[in-house]
Image (cartoon, rainbow, N blue to C red):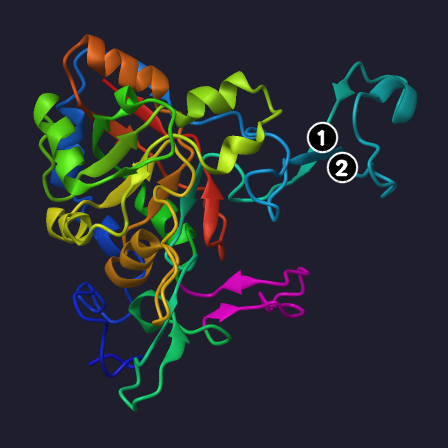
């Protein structure tokens, strides 16, 4: 029994790795799993699986998320937005030959290629066992207690942060390293239509491509979505929110497979991995795969990964496994993070 909850969601992994666990199934990325990934390296070829972080462009995909904003830092006299293309001879001392630039970024952490961390989505659940559902995150961590904000000095160090995850922040995943065996299934032959992929369909593609998923593997679902993102060159069309295949979160068999497969991470090149559920008068989650993975099982979700070049190479070489290295930024207190994943074959 843990300090934060008296009962856990049915089928969840809460407490499986200890009452204070903040990694979830990333715990399955053991030294042996890293070695399995290393054994897949035969050619020494690496693929960056990140979009440029100013893609997709604009805010049509999500009105709350915007492209990065770059600015110069302040200079030595604390003048804002000035330390850029500084000729030291003119600005500091005539004996210096140096030219300097420093910059700062305002970065929406889930704008482009990203990890969704375990504090990204929780749920109303009766964790106290008193018959009343309360808002909780994975492993029973609470908003306002461990997940702070929005409030002044949420971090508690005077830095000005208005939000801070005291627990479940992605720095724990970053410190782990997130390296192991990646496995990719390619469904891009389905085309550009926004359509659900059931477990039966997914297993058909896996059988055709000889894809075998084992516990601890990081599973990538490749659709071709990011090919269109790149083709738009930061000027996306209105169809951006509803294009290319997605995992069918209303397929109970698929949800069961995600659980029983014991994958350590679920990743796609599309937006959100899944689609949206239909109307329902009963209490329900809008996005069941997020609910299952982030809230119940502790599986981080990768979204908008640029997997096209890797998928092409794997097709040409009749491969589907590789070494995957994918730590988020080691930025404490975050629930989403950009990253530059690297697949090595």
Q: Quadrant of residue 58?
A: top right
Rendered position, 288 above or below 179: below
Residue 240 located left or right of residue 77: left
Q: Quadrant of residue 13?
A: bottom left
Q: Residue at x 80, y 31 (%)?
A: 83
Under circle 1, the secondary element is: loop
Q: Residue at x 34, y 45 (%)?
A: 301
- As for residue 154 lying within the magenta part, the answer is yes
Quadrant of the drawing holding the C terminus: top left
Q: Residue at x 40, y 38 (%)?
A: 303
Q: Main secondary structure of the magenta part?
A: loop
Quadrant of the drawing holding the N terminus: bottom left
Task: Identify the mark nearer the N-term, 1 or 2.
Answer: 2
Real-space Cα separation, disc 1 to disc 2, in angstroms: 6 Å
Mark 2 surroundings: few (<14), some (14-19) or many (≥20) residues within 10 A = some
Q: Are marks 1 and 2 in contact (CB under 8 Å)?
A: yes
Please state which of residues 193 and 323 is positioned toward the viewer in this rendering. Answer: 193
Count of labels in the image: 2
Mark 1 surroundings: few (<14), some (14-19) or many (≥20) residues within 10 A = some
| x, y percent for residue 337 | 47, 44
> Which stretch appears magenta?
146-167
Please state which of residues 344 and 185 is positioned toward the viewer in this rendering. Answer: 185
- As for residue 208 lying within the magenta part, the answer is no
Under circle 2, the secondary element is: loop
Label 2 sits on residue: 73
Q: Residue at x 40, y 31 (%)?
A: 305
| x, y percent for residue 221 | 27, 33
Label 1 sits on residue: 102
Residue 31 located left or right of residue 76: left
| x, y percent for residue 122 | 39, 65
Please state which of residues 267 and 240 is positioned toward the viewer in this rendering. Answer: 240
Please state which of residues 318 and 227 is positioned toward the viewer in this rendering. Answer: 227
């Amino acid at each position: 029994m843990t300090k934060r909850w008296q009962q856990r969601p049915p089928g969840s992994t809460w407490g499986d790795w200890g009452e204070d666990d903040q990694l979830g199934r990333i715990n399955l990325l053991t030294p042996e799993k890293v070695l399995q990934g290393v054994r897949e390296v035969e050619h020494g070829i690496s693929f960056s699986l990140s979009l440029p972080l100013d893609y997709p462009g604009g805010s049509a995909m999500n009105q709350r998320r915007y492209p990065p904003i770059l600015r110069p830092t302040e200079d030595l006299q604390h003048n804002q937005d000035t330390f850029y293309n500084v000729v030291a001879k003119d600005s500091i001392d005539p004996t210096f030959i140096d030219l300097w630039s420093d910059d700062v970024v305002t970065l929406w952490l889930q704008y482009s290629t990203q990890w969704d961390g375990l504090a990204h989505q929780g749920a109303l659940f009766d964790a106290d066992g008193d018959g009343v559902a309360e808002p909780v995150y994975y492993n029973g961590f609470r908003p306002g207690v461990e997940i702070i904000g929005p409030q002044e000095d949420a971090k508690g160090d005077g830095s000005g942060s208005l939000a801070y995850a005291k627990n479940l922040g992605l720095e724990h995943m970053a410190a782990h390293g997130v390296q192991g065996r990646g496995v990719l299934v390619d469904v891009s032959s389905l085309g550009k239509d926004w359509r659900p992929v059931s477990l039966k369909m997914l297993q058909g593609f896996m059988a055709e491509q000889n894809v075998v998923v084992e516990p601890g593997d990081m599973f990538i679902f490749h659709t071709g979505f990011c090919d269109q993102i790149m083709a738009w060159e930061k000027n996306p069309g209105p169809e951006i929110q509803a294009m290319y295949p997605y995992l069918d979160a209303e397929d109970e068999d698929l949800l069961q497979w995600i659980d029983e497969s014991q994958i350590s991470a679920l990743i796609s090149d599309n937006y959100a991995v899944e689609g949206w559920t239909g109307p329902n008068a009963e209490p329900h989650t809008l996005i069941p795969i997020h609910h299952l993975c982030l809230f119940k099982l502790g599986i981080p979700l990768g979204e908008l990964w640029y997997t096209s070049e890797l998928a092409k190479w794997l097709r040409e070489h009749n491969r589907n496994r590789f070494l995957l290295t994918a730590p988020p930024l080691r930025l404490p207190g975050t629930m989403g993070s950009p990253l530059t994943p690297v697949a090595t074959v």
